[in-house]
Amino acid sequence: MKHQLLRIFGGITALLLAGIATADELNLRVGVTDISRQVYDLHMTIFLICVAIGVVVFGVLFWSVFAHRKSKGVEPATFHESTKLELAWTIVPTLILIVMAIPATQVLVAMYDTGGEDMSIEVRGYQWKWQYKYLDDDYNNTLSFFSVMSTPRDEIYNQSAKAENYLLEVDEYLRIPTNRKVRFLITAEDVIHAWWVPDFGIKRDAVPGMLNELWTIVEEPGIYRGQCTELCGKDHGFMPIVVEVMPEAEFDAWYASRVSSESVRQETIANALTHEELMAQGEAVYGTYCASCHLANGEGVAPVFPAIAGSAVAQGPRDDHLSLVINGVAGTAMQAFGKQLDSAQLASVVHYQRNAFGNDVGDMSQPQDVINLSNGQ
Amino acid sequence: MSEVIHADHHDDHAHGPAKGLKRWLFTTNHKDIGTLYLWFSFAMFLIGGVLALVIRAELFQPGLQFVQPEFFNQMTTNHGLIMVFGAIMPAFVGLANWLVPMQVGAPDMALPRMNNLSFWILPFAFGMMISTLFMEGGGPNFGWTFYAPLSTTYAPPSVTYFIFAVHLMGASSIMGSINIIATILNMRAPGMTLMKMPMFVWTWLITAYLLIAVMPVLAGAVTMMLFDIHFNTSFFNAAGGGDPVMFQHIFWFFGHPEVYIMILPAFGIVSHIIPAFARKRLFGYTSMVYAVASIAFLSFIVWAHHMFTVGMPLAGQLFFMYSTMLIAVPTGVKVFNWISTMWRGSMTFETPMLFAIAFVVLFTMGGFSGLMLAITPVDYQYHDTYFVVAHFHYVLVPGALFSIIAAVYFWFPKWTGKMYDETLGKIHFWLSFVGVNVTFFPQHFSGLAGMPRRIPDYPLQFADFNMISSVGAFIFGLSQVFFLYVIIKSIRSGAPAADRSWEGAKGLEWTLPSPAPYHSFTHPPVVKDEEVLG
């Protein structure tokens, strides 16, 4: 009996040690910013103070367990109080806490220095994606895009091998330059999310109706990944954050070309599309924006996420369908996609829904229809 | 005249428990109600444990294997709610029912009928809450902290049942607390002054006041949710001028005292067990009482440390950081006093003592991670990661839960008149000890490496620690089924227990026969210092 227990215990210990030995990381990341390094140092200081206290306190406890046993014939002592001791172990810990509080206050004050930024980016959390908007007067605030997880469902459902950045890959990165102070304005559209890039040492809740501030200056170019850290519903685990930090000149070039390609797209957006073009674009938009609730096969999850296959809306009048997608349904998880998608995307996704999953309406939805509908309202 | 008194007296002795189901339905006896509370909490503990094992099974490997994300969220939410409100809190109320009258030298609780009501509300409350899991749209899926607007505008339709269940739980807790306070303040034997009360009674007195103070706050929070959902108010709806952050302030104004509600009675239990098995009086009784009172006071002014990332002004962050750090002082005093009680004692290590020593060590480790979490700038890195999960499981499982298990082993002979099997008890201890550490220690590492809480699937770098954690969870879960076996076996065939079942046990309850008579003290006992103070 005892032997077997020992063997089980040994096995678990071996497993634990193996886990520790093979794990990538055991400790907080040092990160790549001045703030993240200060946070790491503070973490280590507090941790080591705790370890030192632990060694002393547990040392005394285990010595007592070892030495003061009845089986060793020890007679119990009779002391049961000491005002001096009580005072000592009230005052000494208070002093230790003051020693901890001083660097903690300094780091916190440094983190709150949000002024003097070189550029600002609005970060907006949605169920379950991030929107980044570059707040830049020169370009009339035109550049804004969504960043959605791009890990395929096959990987999540174990039907294909998982890529290196499993669950940490998105369709478009947030890009920022090195060595410039970037201020992030964090908010949310629906529920509370939290925006966190561990290597920058910054995290803040994205709260609907509130604008929170964060800032960072990154010296090292590279790709840095994080995840949403506030429970925000079904796909909370599937809305990663990826930031690419580019050398300044490279960033400026990318930014200019990204803005101009965006304006070209805006100019041609009202052009009519063929059924095949609509279906192709619609399927892509559906996969990114709709499938997480209504599922890839359009079956939905009743009663919270209704089915699109065979639904009255998707087979009813086209303009009702369009305006539901544009305006959302108040009081439900159905968002107002008019704020998130452009007219071509809206037209194509509605067209796709009306002509897929066994729905076969056969009418056309064109970008111009979306524009007319929006103007009419 | 004397004949009348005699007849009364005789009547009293003839009055035993009713037979069958009626005994339990209509009982007003503190021991029967205590037993009901304890078995109820154990049943909830097993249900909550099964939900935890669903979580751990899904997290055994990356990818989605067993459950869908929406069901996973219902598992985390209901695991938390059931363990907090269904397992830990009712278990402590059950212990209070059994022990407070015996420890203060009273025949029963002060308000026996209300006692019955406060228990029998609970099966309905939890029956309703658990039934939501089978409703269309599923049960609560917004985490046990149910932050708005995820729990209001975006909640499943069953949230209304959840709100009603929380109201019922709150009513039950408030009634239980009123009863405990009334018993302690009015029914102590002559000579038992406040500063001679046993530590378990002291900690429960303070806990009961905490409950009365914060349960109405929780009721207010869920009522505002109800109004937001059904009556178009906008307490927490930003689009209507409300504030989602206000929900968090209200919730944690309840929630932080709540976490001390779950640990103060544990402090009391450990303060009985360590002196008994060290055969030495509790060190620093007076400072222990003041420490508990200080912790209770501080619990009201630290709530926003749960919300450091929510975007508060610097001054607010600093205030809540400093006040939170201060809690380490009275908590440290308690740990130092326990160790000083052990120091130069004459210790033996029966099962209750093993659980109590594990409590001191592992709770202190949870305290250290709590201190780290109090440091605001580094909390930004820990917040809502598995580091937090590791922290609060260290204070709740080897903390609160171990103290409850220790109490069951310690007072079992007094309750049943039988001794449990010491070998089986020790096996249960070591299995639990190994299980709890294998489960929760690796979670510190996955948290520091950056794994967020409440996710059904995770990036590949967290795979090793999650696998270890899941193995530990199944060891721990099975060892609690073993606990059930130990208890049932001991009730059926344990050796007869002595009145003073432990050599070093002190307190009025040990002056009663084992098992304790149906009405504890029908005549007030004589309170001797060497009995009540050890």
Image (tube, coloured by chain):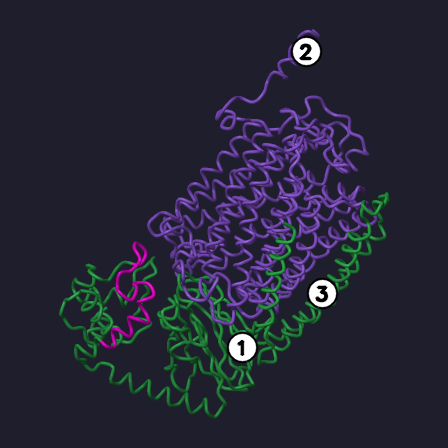
Chain colours: A green, B purple
Q: Residues at badges 1 and 3 in contact (C-beta under 8 Å)?
A: no
Q: Specify the segment rendered in magenta.
A: A280-305
> Furthest residue to the left?
A362
Q: In which quarter of the image is residue B176?
A: top right
Q: Does dot 1 land on a helix, a strand or a loop? A: strand
Q: How many residues crowd around disc 2 within 10 Å: few (fewer than 14), some, or many (20 or more)?
A: few
- Based on the picture, tell me whether residue A303 belongs to the magenta stretch: yes
What whole-number distance in Å separates the C-alpha atoms at marks 1 and 3? Answer: 32 Å
* Number of the label disc, if any, that sits on residue A51: 3
Dot 1 falls on which chain?
Answer: A
- Residue A133, image x, y percentages: 41, 78
- Residue A59, image x, y percentages: 77, 59
- Based on the picture, tell me whether residue A242 belongs to the magenta stretch: no
Q: Quadrant of residue A279?
A: bottom left
Q: Does dot 2 land on a helix, a strand or a loop? A: helix
In the figure, A328 relative to B285: above or below? below
Give the amino acid at mark 3.
Val
Classify the position of the C terminus of chain A by image quarter.
bottom left
Dot 2 falls on which chain?
Answer: B
* Number of the label disc, if any, that sits on residue A215: 1
Q: Residues at badges 2 and 1 in contact (C-beta under 8 Å)?
A: no
